[in-house]
Image (cartoon, rainbow, N blue to C red):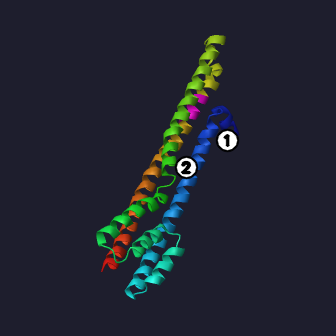
Amino acid sequence: MIEFFIKGGPLLYPIVFCSILALGIFLERLWVFARVRRGAQELAKKVENHLFKDEKAEAIALCEVSKNPLGRIILTALNLAGKPRDRIKQEVEEIGELETLVVNRYLGLLSTIATISPLLGLLGTVIGMIQAFNVIAVQGVGTPATLGVGISQALITTAAGLSVAIPAILLHRYLASRAGLLIVEIEEHSLHIVNIISK
């Protein structure tokens, strides 16, 4: 592995860093998605039970201590109880757009990693080919061994960049899909609570 890094040149290090960062983002987002989804379901159920028992104060207190994005959304709806449904819905949608930003956090960075990794590999390829042509300019065509270092660096960085970019694209698409579904679930919980409050 050490020999592989040496042959790949200095650009292999940022490519490896990008791969570690992409994996970290993927695992962190999976954990956040699971926590937010589970918390939203539990919170919505508890708030609904309080509202059916006409325990608005308890529902507000529950939302105030909740760290789930849905808690702040429902709190907005509860504070507007008694207002027209359209106004409550509009306020809930506005605060919902802000609160659900936590769901999409770091997805842009993951997309950037997927874009920049093959570019780093391409830059390594260019540098490797420049070295190979410099050898030809100084020593002539010579033997394949004289060109091996530059060409090897070019091929290794290209392969490494693509090896990071392809999984990063797939992971980004998967997380974006999961994020979309989670936001829809939060919206459904929010509208359900709004309907209860309106009645």
User: In the image, what residue type sits under mark 2?
Assistant: Ala
Can you give x and y, in whole percent of width and height, for residue 185 in the image? 38, 67
Q: Residue at x 59, y 25 (%)?
A: 127
Residue assigned mark 1:
1
Question: 115 or 186, which is in the foreground?
Answer: 186
Q: Residue at x 52, y 34 (%)?
A: 119
User: Which range of residues does the magenta coloring cover?
Assistant: 153-158
Residue assigned mark 2:
22
Q: CA distance from mark 2 to mark 1?
A: 21 Å
Answer yes or no: is residue 108 visible. Answer: yes
Image side of residue 123 versus residue 60, left or right: right
- State which tag comes first along the sequence, 2 or 1: 1
User: In the image, what residue type sits under mark 1?
Assistant: Met
What secondary structure characterizes most of the magenta part? helix
Quadrant where the N terminus lies? Answer: top right
Image side of residue 9 versus residue 185, left or right: right
Can you give x and y, in whole percent of width and height, for residue 122 in the image? 53, 31
Q: Residue at x 42, y 74 (%)?
A: 79
**Number of numbered labels in the structure image:** 2
Q: Are marks 2 and 1 in contact (CB under 8 Å)?
A: no
On screen, residue 42 above or below 100: below
Q: Nearer the viewer, mark 2 or mark 1?
A: 2
Can you give x and y, in whole percent of width and height, for residue 4 in the image? 65, 37
